[in-house]
Amino acid sequence: MSVAITLTIAVAGTLSTGAPAQAASTKTCAVDQASVYDICFDGNGDKFIVDDLRSDGMRAVVKWKAMDGSGRVGQCADTDGARNGPKVCNYDFKEGPRNYVIFQGFVQDGPRGEPQFLSWAYNGYISPR
């Protein structure tokens, strides 16, 4: 039995115990660059959270695009050094059940440096499903 199948069975067993329902999570976080930086989007408040985790002189950045009909794009960067706590950038996106943001993290040397350690692209829902 593979690990994925075992995990699915374990989760399914947990869900069928009759525990009280909990509110859906509003936060989507990257899982692929955790030793270099952490990035998250929190749909509750339309916030990006970026945290530089490596003392290498680079800044940690999350680049985003709103898929809400506005065409907005932007970046949020943690520029005050590693392990000083995350930078939170608060935006106001158009609410809607089909609206989301696409975001990706990386590190770079200054504001115009070449992006390094690019994360996968993630979707974060503006109105949690």
Image (spheres, rainbow, N blue to C red):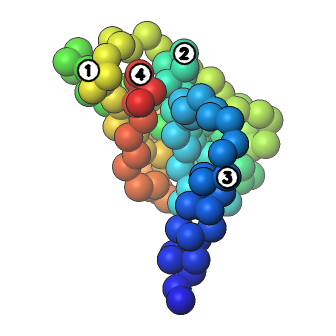
Q: Which residue is mark 4?
A: 127
Residue 79's x, y, as percent?
A: 64, 32
Q: CA distance from mark 3 to mark 4?
A: 28 Å
Residue 7's x, y, as percent?
A: 58, 70
Q: Image point 38% across, 40% down: which residue?
A: 123
| Mark toward the start of the polypeptide (4 vs 2) | 2
Q: Image point 40% across, 46% down: which residue?
A: 122
Q: Amino acid at mark 2?
A: Gly
Mark 2 secondary-structure assignment? loop
Q: Amino acid at mark 1?
A: Asp
Q: CA distance from mark 4 to mark 2?
A: 10 Å
Mark 1 secondary-structure assignment? loop
The dot on residue 45 is: 2
The dot on residue 48 is: none
Residue 31's x, y, as percent?
A: 56, 56
| Mark toward the start of the polypeptide (4 vs 1) | 1
Q: Image point 55% across, 32% down: which residue?
A: 24
Q: Amino acid at mark 3?
A: Thr
Q: Which residue is mark 1?
A: 68
In contact (CB < 8 Å): disc 4 and disc 2: no
The count of marks equals 4
Q: Which residue is mark 3?
A: 17
Is 65 positioned to the left or the right of 17 in the image? left
Taking depth in this image into account, of 97 and 116 the one nearest to the observer is 97
